[in-house]
Amino acid sequence: MKKGKSPQPGAPEPQSGWDLADAATWRFEHDVCERLARQLRSVGDAFAWRAFGYHRQFILALSRNDPPGPMYGKAGLPAERDWVERAFKEDGHFVLMHDVTNCLRIGDVTVWDEINPPRTEEIKTNPKNRRGAQIRRINQARAAVRDGGPLPGANTAERLHDLDLPLRAHLDILRAAADQAAAQGVHATTVPGVRALTVVDQHACTRLGLSSEDFNERFRRTFETALTSAGIAARRGELNWHATSLDHTARDPLRVPWANYPLPPAW
């Protein structure tokens, strides 16, 4: 496109209706499709976390590969779909295809039944073409979870360790803050442990007609009040800051999917 050439034969029809000769059209189309794919894979991630009973060690072990590429046109896709349907219809087993997730990157599918632990499999159209490297990584992931062996990868010092520390999540505070932000655009509150939380609902800000200046002032004032209530306003230079966004969906395979949070789907 940058050389002034027309799109190659068979190129998809842009859904935006923009100029086919403009490279910006194709960048926009790519960005939209990439985001849609991540949103769909975030649903697959939620299936994976729930099916594994929210045990993070399975995700840690099976995520240690490059991100999945496009499913469309994948040579082994029909074989994987047939395998999934057969396992369900004949044995009643739930099977999750890894390509519909972002967090499961080793192997092609994982199978759950009522008796055995989850089983990850590599599916090939021709059984003779099974790749030894992939099988080794599957076996490494299995051994890392069950036997404490090294995680898949070159560094054999990387292993899973259980910490005898309870995790305390304040999801009730997050839920209440998100509810307020949905009405006000911005809401901040304190969190136990000398912390403050601010939630921004961009849809609400748009609905309320907040300009950039209005938003910045509301955010500053709201957050400053929360910092003061938490007793940390005077310690700004010492604070640890952490921010997250819905746009992080299905990027980091170790993040718990938003769909697993006990929040209304719109949030």
Image (cartoon, helix red, strand yellow):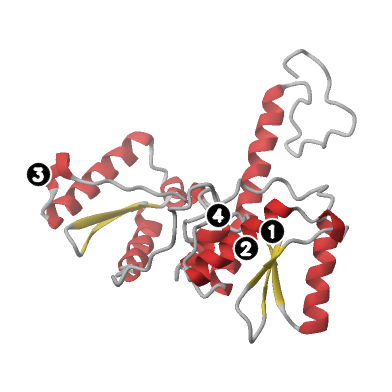
The residue at which mark 1 appears reads as: 135
Image coordinates for residue 81, horizontal then vertical, percent? 81, 64
Which one is earlier in the sequence, the residue at label 3 or at label 1? 1
Residue at position x 50%, y 50% in the image = 252
Q: Nearer the viewer, residue 250 or 98?
A: 98
The residue at which mark 4 appears reads as: 152
Q: CA distance from mark 3 to mark 4?
A: 45 Å
User: Which label is found at residue 139?
Assistant: 2
Tell me, yes or no, whether the two marked residues, 1 and 2, touch with CB atoms within 8 Å.
Answer: yes
The residue at which mark 3 appears reads as: 234
Amino acid type at mark 3: Ala
- Closer to viewer: mark 3 or mark 2: 2
Amino acid type at mark 1: Ile
Q: What is the crowding at mark 2: few (fewer than 14 residues within 10 Å), some, or many (at least 20)?
A: some
Q: What is the crowding at mark 1: few (fewer than 14 residues within 10 Å), some, or many (at least 20)?
A: some
Residue at position x 68%, y 51% in the image = 133
Q: Nearer the viewer, residue 175 or 86?
A: 86
Q: CA distance from mark 3 to mark 1?
A: 55 Å
Image coordinates for residue 148, horizontal then vertical, percent? 47, 67
Position of residue 229 relative to residue 46, above or below, is above
